[in-house]
Image: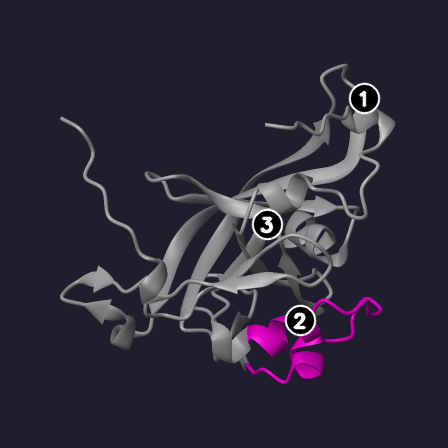
Amino acid sequence: MAEYFYQPRNGHGLAHDPFNAIIGPRPIGWISTRGADGSVNLAPYSFFNAFNYHPPIIGFASLGAKDTLRNARETGELVWNLVTRELFAAMNESSALMPYGVSEFARAGVSEAKARLVRAPMVAEARVRFECLVADIVQLKSAAGVLAESWLVLAEVVAVHIDEALLVEGVFDTFGAGIMLRGGGASAYAEISPAARRDLKRPL
């Protein structure tokens, strides 16, 4: 096997950084928040995942001090909205750089829905939504202790909304929901489909 080797601190020398293409496809953190002044924000984050069962913890990394981070700090609340194929284009529209206080909901053509336990709005059209309370915000740093311009936001899921059509005999239909994932490069995405499913039982 011919091997391409590089040290990230010296650059990768390729057309596009392979790091986030290798770690992928990744779930999309489509996060909605409300600031202390009432401003709402909706933005997708490609560094997103789940980290714990009990309590359920999700997290995303904000590369730079963006509006979502500001609102999460100010109010301690957020909502994660599932991106499925019918919301794919809307999610992309919400990634546009817009002044603070201008609603990405309007830009993306989606509606705000009132959450039950938090003040942050939900995407009404999203088929799954997690209402969350911020548990921790950590500024990331290198192994040498040098702070990065990136913050990890960890949040506890305190309420879950699921379209009942996605529950098949009590099991969430991951492969039939049309879930979109972030791939590598500037524009690559993938969709989870039934054809992509593979099953393995854990060894005893």
**Label 1 sits on residue:** 146
The mark nearer the N terminus, 2 or 1, is 2
Mark 3 nearby-residue class (10 Å; few <14, some 14–19, many ≥20): many
The residues colored magenta run: 88-111
Residue 106 is a magenta residue: yes
Query: In the image, which disc is placed on residue 181?
Result: none
Residue 70 in view, yes or no: yes
The mark nearer the N terminus, 1 or 3, is 3
**Label 2 sits on residue:** 92
Residue, x 50% and y 46% (percent of image)?
Answer: 49
Q: Where the N terminus falls, by quadrant?
A: top right
- Give the camera-side residue of 42 and 78: 42
- The picture places residue 149, in percent across and down from the top left corner, at 80, 37
**Label 3 sits on residue:** 76
Above or below 28: residue 123: below
At label 1, which amino acid type do we have?
Val
- The picture places residue 126, in percent across and down from the top left corner, at 46, 74
The mark nearer the N terminus, 3 or 2, is 3
- The picture places residue 14, in percent across and down from the top left corner, at 80, 42
